[in-house]
Image (cartoon, rainbow, N blue to C red):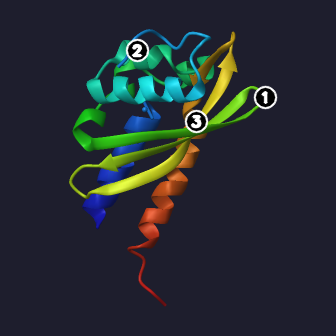
Amino acid sequence: MRKVFILLLSLCIGVAALVVVGCGGGGSSDSPEQVVEKFVKATMAGDADTAYSLISEDSKDEIESKEELVEGVGEGVSDYSVGGASVSGDTAKVATSLTLKDIDFEMKFDMILVKEGGAWKIDLAQTQTEMEKALEEFMKEFEPEE
């Protein structure tokens, strides 16, 4: 169980510090779903430049290097899906799921995006909070019943 927890935690940090190919850097015409799709593909492919171009300015201030956005994601995630977006003003939530290798676990969470300069960008801190909630739900399966 500890190995599973460590694997999930490192994946969460890697993906959240990403956090979901890309072409381009998330221009203003990209929908929130398209930005998440590009972000996930970039992180899985190890494309740090593209992933970095898709995160918010606040998120850029929180990471040490572009490479930490993609570190280990390709090895840890076997599949993903991007659902619909819920938009409220300059914030969007995009339903996302990642299937983790080795434990065949599908982690479902919302990627949070903010609008900056007319373009949607991934907010890593808010997305990490959503991922942590998903991880907590998963870990409940391993808690002993009272």
Q: Residue furthest bottom?
A: 146
x, y percent for residue 42: 36, 23
Query: In the depicted view, which residue is nearer to us: 131 or 3?
Result: 131
Task: State the image quarter where residue 65 is shown.
Answer: top left
The amino acid type found where label 3 is placed reads Ala
Q: Dots 3 and 2: beta carbons under 8 Å?
A: no
Q: Residue at point 40% right, 14% down?
A: 50
The amino acid type found where label 1 is placed reads Gly
Q: Which mark is residue 50?
A: 2
Report whether 29 appears left or right of 38.
Answer: right
Query: In the depicted view, which residue is nearer to us: 89 or 14?
Result: 89
Report whether 15 appears left or right of 111.
Answer: left
Q: Which residue is mark 1?
A: 89
Distance (Cα) linking label 1 and label 3: 19 Å
Q: Quadrant of the N terminus?
A: bottom left
The amino acid type found where label 2 is placed reads Thr
Q: Residue at point 26% right, 42% down?
A: 76
Distance (Cα) linking label 3 and label 2: 19 Å
Q: Nearer the viewer, mark 3 or mark 2?
A: 2
x, y percent for residue 108: 47, 51
| For residue 57, above or below residue 114 | above
Q: Which residue is mark 3?
A: 125
Secondary structure state at the residue bearing disc 3:
helix
Q: Nearer the viewer, mark 1 or mark 3?
A: 1
